[in-house]
Amino acid sequence: MRALFFLCLFREKQEPNFFIRFLFLSLLILLSNGCHRSEDRKTVVVGYLGKKAITVKNLEDTARFMGLGSASRHRPLTEWTLSERNAALRETVQDFFLEEEGKKRGIKIRPNEIKDYLKNHFPQPEKSLEPFARKALFLQKTEEALAPFPDISISIERSFYKNHQNLFRISRQAIVDHIVVAKQEEAESIRDALIKGSSFARLAKLESLGMEASSGGRMKPYPRGTMPPPFDTVFTMKPGEITPVLSSPYGYHLFRLEKFIPEHTLSFSMVKNWIKKKLTRVKRQKVLQEWLAQKLQKSPFHRAPTYKGIFSPFPVTISGSQTF
């Protein structure tokens, strides 16, 4: 390459336009190579779903749709994590069948539906997001057509509640006021002021760096073992007590225990809606899994030999009855 470059310089003395032509042709070659790489992603096949080819480009598009854009952007498929590759492949296969089914059923997405979707899902909707919204709505409507929302009776909801009490049991929780600052001396000074009777809420609003500072330092109730170690100190205290200054990677902390909420079980009325949503999701999912298993029996997925080593066998359905 270096010899060619010097040759060009030599020729330039004799033919002034030669060097310009050489640079222009080199640029065209570079651009051509880039285009080929882009085209390759569209044509490189990772497997076949029946007779349909699934390409690297399909997986990249699905990864972006799933929110895994960082996985596919400027990185070859072999550099994705195994879980990223498997998730993108599984979703690509499922979406292909759903899109095919939606077209057969004549499912349409209206402009006002796209507008409402963007308004409800994005703080600043942009026109570039419309294809994403259209696809999401199309897949959602197709799933609803395949698996309509079932009627869950109150007796079934109560039965689930009775048989799964452990899901609704809440451990003892602490209600705590909290101040965190950057320097130990500052924390010691604030503690002295609190011991002398200064308002915890006022000092939290003035001095604390914590997210709960604006509410006077009052934290949401939490059980033991769910927060960083210094926060669990309050479980050995009595209501009204203030901790010594405690350090953590986040700063220097002061806690005042307000009270404990005893261990208890949430009432049926408090969790009724959650139970209904869960049972509805499980029933619909079962219908969709059975439908997907039937589609895969008719059009099984076969990996291309080149890509067999970078995907692991994994279940398309949660039940694991059908794998590819």
Image (tube, helix red, strand yellow):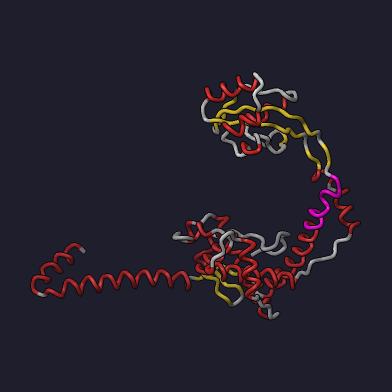
The secondary structure that most of the magenta stretch takes on is helix
Locate residue 117 relative to residue 152 in the image: left or right: left
The magenta-colored residue range is 267-277
Question: Quadrant of the image for the C terminus?
Answer: bottom right
In reply to whether residue 271 is colored magenta, the answer given is yes
Q: Is residue 143 above or below residue 218?
A: below
> Which of 96/141 is in front?
141
Would you identify the image quadrant in which residue 96 lies? bottom right
Q: Residue at x 77, y 67 (%)?
A: 287
Would you identify the image quadrant in which residue 134 lies? bottom right
In reply to whether residue 263 is colored magenta, the answer given is no
Q: Is residue 76 above or below residue 255?
A: below
Q: Residue furthest left?
A: 14
Residue 183 location, x and y as percent?
A: 51, 27
Asked whether residue 304 appears in the rendered view, the answer is no
> Which of 251/30 is in front?
251
Q: Is residue 133 above or below residue 259?
A: below
Q: How many marks?
A: 0
Q: Residue furthest right?
A: 155
Asked whether residue 92 appears in the rendered view, the answer is yes
Residue 203 location, x and y as percent?
A: 61, 29
Q: Residue at x 55, y 58 (%)?
A: 68
> Which of 195/245 is in front?
195
